[in-house]
Amino acid sequence: MTNGGGTWRSGWLRGLLRPGSTGRAAAIAVLVVAALLGSAYALGRSLIPDRPRQSATGVTGDPNSSRYADQPPIVPTETEQSDQDGDRSAPPSAGQDGSTSDANGDSLFGAHSTTGDKRVALTFDDGPDPQYTPQVLNALREFGVRATFCVVGEMAQSHPDLVRAIVADGHTLCNHSWNHDVTLGKRSPDVIRADLLRTNEAIRAAAPDAPIVWYRQPGGAWTYPVVSVANALGMTPLHWTVDPADWEAPGAARIAATVTSQIEPGSVVLMHDAGGNRQGTVEALWQLLPELTARFELEALPTDRT
Ligand SMILES: [Zn+2]
């Protein structure tokens, strides 16, 4: 009999609707079942650890191992930041970074989040780092891929040889502030300007001829002043399209899966070669590069036009 289920459901519904003891009994049964289901759901939820919040995209967020908490700042201004930064709640207009989306990109204050053409750019933030930057460079070299490194001023000062190695391999540079101050955008234009200039000086001390035409605000916490100062100094604000949250060290497989599923022509991919344990990022690169080089034209962000 093919309609047995339907018959059963019909009778059950009639029982519910019909006044009288049968209906009440059925209603009570439904309530009990619902309560049991609710309990089971609550129990299941309680057994699942909360996923780390996709908050400050693009931040180096491992508080145990990261020197740079590219995550929401641990300063009083943190609460202010959430309502206007370009980071924890505002991926780029092409936003597919898994965090809550600000589709119109208003909080980017005009920062670029795509390459502007079909090419795809890999970007590596927070270095240079003596442990991981050379590994990233090796992987990129193996696949003939040029990328863009958003370097932190004091890291560049500490590791000028690595800045030179980056440039020597044909990669391009991006200013990522002096010491990764995610609240820099809230400071005065003079303070912002001094920070960015100091960073450029450290980079140029290492690689005098390397153009620095991009600026990425730590934490993606863009503000109008920081965008204005960067522009005034000849640097174009650079955000991102794809954020695999590698700073959370989710493992190479997840990093690679996020990138391969979200990347598209014009994407700017955010990864980190410093700021914590980046072995997962390095391993993800080796997994990703064969596919990405087959699917896209990977190129460093240009220094001759911004
Ligand atoms: Zn950063």
Image (cartoon, grey):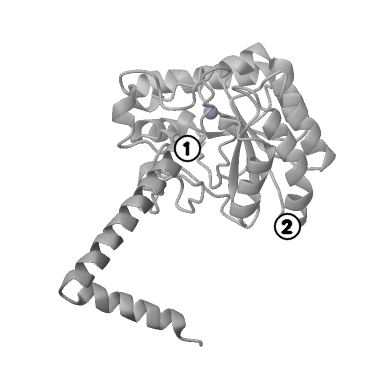
Answer yes or no: is residue 120 visible. Answer: no
Amino acid residing under circle 2: Arg
The residue under label 2 is: 295
**Count of marks overlaid on the render:** 2
Disc 1 residue lies near ligand 1 with CB under 8 A: no
Answer yes or no: is residue 75 visible. Answer: yes
Residue occupying the point 67% across, 22% down? 208
The residue under label 1 is: 47
Task: Indicate whether 20 appears above or below 206.
Answer: below
Task: Indicate whether 165 appears above or below 245.
Answer: above
Determine whether, in the image, residue 221 is placed left or right of residue 130: left
Q: Position of residue 245 (x, y in %)?
A: 55, 37
Q: Residues within 10 Å of mark 2 (few under 14, many from 20)?
A: some
Of residues 17 and 225, which is closer to you in this image?
17
Determine whether, in the image, residue 101 is placed left or right of residue 77: right
Looking at the image, tell me whether mark 2 or mark 1 is earlier in sequence order. 1
Residue occupying the point 39% across, 41% down? 89
Task: Indicate whether 228 appears above or below 24.
Answer: above
Amino acid residing under circle 1: Leu
Q: Position of residue 303 (x, y in %)?
A: 63, 39
Q: CA distance from mark 2 to mark 1?
A: 39 Å
Query: Marks 1 and 2: in contact by CB < 8 Å?
Result: no
Q: Position of residue 39 (x, y in %)?
A: 36, 46
The secondary structure type at the circle numbered 2 is: helix
Task: Indicate whether 230 appears above or below 89.
Answer: above
Q: Residues within 10 Å of mark 1 (few under 14, many from 20)?
A: few
Determine whether, in the image, residue 170 is placed left or right of residue 249: right
* Residue that extends furthest to the top in the rendered view of this protein: 158
The secondary structure type at the circle numbered 1 is: helix
